[in-house]
Image (cartoon, rainbow, N blue to C red):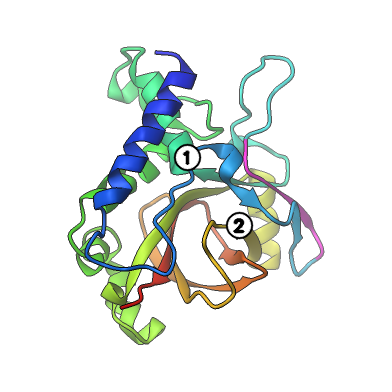
């Protein structure tokens, strides 16, 4: 199956899923898992740490001119943060699944998303759980128990007052991870369709080990500013309106 068809199928599955996921709630903005990489709006192409290191922020992987393949961001020495939508991780792993490799062989494979098969799979698994969830509180209890336990005391409202609107993987290269470790977190600005300055939002973030945390976000100029400290999946959530 060619990559274009895989992407189209992934888009169709996203469109079908959003019609049923969290259908009992009325949202200020819609569930929008960004169907293609071009739909990820990175509003600031670079950010700086507190120590002055500049980090490039990209919505798609770099291409190695020698091989024509996507550069795997988390093994790169370049100072880059890559924001990848769930549609890209679904398509990348679907393409490799067609090769017939074993699960063990697939795990560490580089993919067209610029992430490993395993990293793609982490976001893909979360996407599947989101589309199957009957409530946000149940979703968080199953996928992010630490965040679920602290949600109401941290956010000031129940988890079921919020609904997911977008899923991304945010990955730091080796160079960026070192810069963040030395200078603290950096704020990455993402344009999410439907989000306005009055939208109440919060993010649930996971690291590669599956540990979850609640990350406050701010909305300014229609962009969502998310504090990044580690690589892993991010679920943006907006306050539902009655």
Q: Is residue 55 magenta?
A: yes
Q: Position of residue 53 (x, y in %)?
A: 79, 58
- Quarter of the rendering occupied by the N terminus: top left
In the picture of the structure, the residue carrying the numbered disc 1 is 35
Q: Decide if residue 207 is in sight here.
A: no
Mark 1–mark 2 Cα distance, whole angstroms, equals 14 Å
Q: Is residue 148 magenta?
A: no
- Identified at 32% across, 36% down, the residue is 13
Q: Which residues are magenta?
A: 52-60
- Residue 191's tag is 2
Mark 2 element type: strand
Observer-nearest residue: 118 or 36?
36
- Residue 233's tag is none
Q: Position of residue 104 (x, y in %)?
A: 31, 24
Q: Position of residue 203 (x, y in %)?
A: 45, 66
Q: Is residue 5 left or right of residue 125?
A: right
What is the total number of numbered labels drawn onto the structure image? 2
């Amino acid at each position: 199956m060619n990559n274009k068809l895989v992407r189209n199928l992934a888009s169709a599955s996203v469109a079908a899923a959003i019609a049923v996921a969290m259908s009992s709630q009325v949202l200020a903005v819609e569930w929008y898992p960004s169907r293609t990489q071009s739909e990820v709006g990175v509003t600031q192409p670079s950010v700086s740490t507190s120590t002055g290191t500049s980090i490039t922020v990209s919505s798609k992987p770099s291409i190695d001119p020698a091989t024509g393949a996507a550069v795997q961001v988390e093994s790169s020495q370049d100072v880059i943060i890559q924001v990848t939508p769930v549609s890209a991780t679904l398509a990348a792993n679907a393409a490799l699944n067609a090769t017939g490799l074993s699960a063990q062989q697939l795990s560490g494979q580089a993919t067209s998303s610029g992430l490993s098969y395993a990293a793609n799979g982490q976001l893909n698994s979360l996407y599947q759980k989101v589309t199957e969830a009957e409530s946000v509180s149940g979703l968080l209890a199953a996928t992010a128990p630490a965040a679920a336990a602290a949600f109401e005391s941290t956010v000031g409202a129940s988890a079921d007052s919020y609904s997911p609107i977008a899923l991304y993987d945010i990955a730091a290269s080796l160079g960026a991870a070192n810069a963040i470790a030395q200078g603290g977190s950096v704020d990455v600005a993402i344009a999410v369709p439907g989000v306005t300055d009055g939208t109440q939002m919060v993010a649930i973030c996971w690291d590669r080990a599956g540990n979850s945390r609640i990350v406050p976000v701010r909305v300014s100029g229609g962009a969502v500013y998310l504090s990044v400290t580690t690589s892993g999946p991010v679920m943006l959530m907006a306050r539902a309106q009655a």
